Amino acid sequence: MKKIINDPKDIIEEMLSGIVESYPSLVHRVADSRVIAKNSSLAQVGLVSGGGSGHEPAHAGFVGDGMLSAAVLGDVFTSPTPDQIEIAIEEANQGQGVLLIVKNYTGDILNFEMAKDLAEMNEIATEIVVVDDDIAVEDSTYTAGKRGVAGTILVHKILGNAAKHGASLTELKTLGERVVAATKTIGVALKAATVPEVGKPGFSLAEDEIEFGVGIHGEPGYRKEQLQPSKALAQEMVTKLLASYEEKPQTIGVLVNGMGGTPLMEQFVFINDVLHLLTEENISVSFHKVGNYMTSIDMQGLSLTFIDLADQTWQHALTRYVSTISW
Amino acid sequence: MKKIINDPKDIIEEMLSGIVESYPSLVHRVADSRVIAKNSSLAQVGLVSGGGSGHEPAHAGFVGDGMLSAAVLGDVFTSPTPDQIEIAIEEANQGQGVLLIVKNYTGDILNFEMAKDLAEMNEIATEIVVVDDDIAVEDSTYTAGKRGVAGTILVHKILGNAAKHGASLTELKTLGERVVAATKTIGVALKAATVPEVGKPGFSLAEDEIEFGVGIHGEPGYRKEQLQPSKALAQEMVTKLLASYEEKPQTIGVLVNGMGGTPLMEQFVFINDVLHLLTEENISVSFHKVGNYMTSIDMQGLSLTFIDLADQTWQHALTRYVSTISW
């Protein structure tokens, strides 16, 4: 394993410290916790997300005015504990309640629900929106139902904008569920991530082999195949995504998300192929985003997310300026 | 070679198309060229940069109001041709002349100088600022003198801000030379990049070996060693950078730049170590930036850049909001 780290058991502490010390004008660490919170504290419903580390810049990179109020970090690929999530809820609460945006993994759901119970005992109104945008497989490793992956950052953005403009906790939960239903993601992996404490890749692929549908913790996908040109990958993924909508969308947003080890060069070549296919399908694209947003440490590969933007206010929400580290 | 591409010879065309089609509100392609230009055209001195492809998001990601007027792309790791650079100059010119920001590589210098001559024949006043921030070695492969690397993006930002606020061509050239003199970078590589048309890594390192001072095209560095903890890498690189200043700076900006294949997790662990060392040195850090800005395709490794911020207006320039794809 070749990584720029110190002792693997200190990674989270050191990374967290690196993040907050690098962006002191935007975020701070809640004392003695694994919670990164925004510096400004407008009167609004608080938004909290988080999960295992290893997906950087998610979620700490999306903390800031107009997106998340706070992010809570677990160990690598491991849910944060309920007490840490509860600290994030307390920090985010401005008296109007707190919405938790949780990627659908069994451990995360369990711990965020426990934290919700703790917060409610402290009289903080709390709701949960579960993101399950990954259409690749049902009932994966660590997950009942579909997994929550890169589409989560679009949920952060649209709900963050709504919260900033005064939406109530109930309105945000309803909006969140609508956004999640409109958001679909599928991934492809070329090479597995190496978790520092494990020291070797989490799964193996032959030198010319790829896997469709791999999750952001290396969960198995739905098909292994020989490496194909970008155009063929785009065809497979666009077809699968469009088939997952009950009705073919007319206007969408497109997110190409690098998994951590895939250069932008490949991501831009790939989105070029995706956009050509969408033109052929007469689907209009009114929002685009390309880069590493929900990674799997150093995995090689990428995911493609579509969001149905029939509701034009969502497109507006996605393009509003926010002051975060990484949006 | 495992890459998400089509025919390697189409990469630049497809990537360029992917970039401009993904960010149509910010940039456009100058017809029949390899030039990406900003959509707005304020009356100001034009700023043009560019170079070989493979360093994404540099330089197209830094085109926008407050940074570059246009970026020109060569083949992978190959200088753009003078005629293409001349197109970028014509596009950037608003009647007040054009400044070219060029990384110090022999091919780039030659071609940008030829383009400057062409532009001057067309009566466009043109000046060149050469960036040679890499302190690792003198006279490298492809380079006489020191190489130009990640510090270039800080030059883009400070000059971009000055140009937007009315600096003249002469003032920008003088400012550019001062900024370059204050900017120092050093890199470390864990694994070489693979140029798509070549198909195999550009150099080799043993499984436990790293190389200090490698350039952004894989040029040899100054020492190979066993992989060390992040703290030790930081110590080596901070010491070398500080020693390169005639007088130890009191306030600096710090850029940790991932080479393309290094996850943010490692970059944040590394900057945490850097910042601790700077605290011990009683050096204040008033600007931080962490991420993949001047990459070497999929190289694993990172570079560390310091900029002496004795001139406080530079810190201000670095933190001003800009509308670009990647700043």
Image (cartoon, coloured by chain):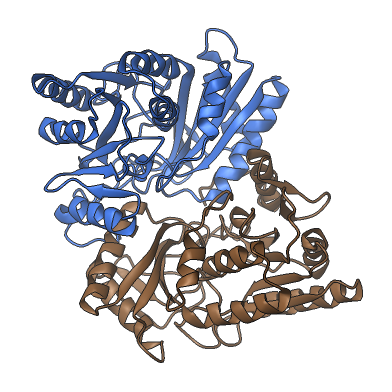
Chain colours: A blue, B brown
Q: Is residue B261 left or right of residue A125?
A: right
Query: Which residue is pictured at 37% across the width and 52% down the height?
Result: B263
Query: Which residue is pictured at 10% across the width and 33% down the height?
Result: A83
Q: Quadrant of residue A122?
A: top left
Nearer the observer, B50 or B233: B50
Query: Which residue is pictured at 63% across the width and 39% down the height?
Result: B22
Q: Position of residue B251 (x, y in %)?
A: 36, 76
Q: Is residue A47 visible?
A: yes
Q: Position of residue A212 (x, y in %)?
A: 45, 30
Above or below, B121 relative to A214: below
Nearer the observer, A285 or B181: B181
Q: Hey, which residue is sitting farthest front in the picture?
A: A43
Nearer the observer, B42 or A257: B42
Q: Position of residue A109 (x, y in %)?
A: 21, 22
Q: Quadrant of residue A161?
A: top left
Q: Is residue B238 left or right of residue B195?
A: left
Nearer the observer, B112 or A210: B112
Q: Hey, which residue is sitting farthest bottom in the picture?
A: B246
Q: Hey, which residue is sitting farthest top in the picture?
A: A246
Q: Is residue B142 visible?
A: no
Q: Is residue A84 left or right of residue B144?
A: left
Above or below, A5 relative to B167: above
Query: Which residue is pictured at 71% across the width and 73% down the height?
Result: B168
Q: Position of residue A64 (x, y in %)?
A: 36, 41
Above or below, A312 relative to A196: above
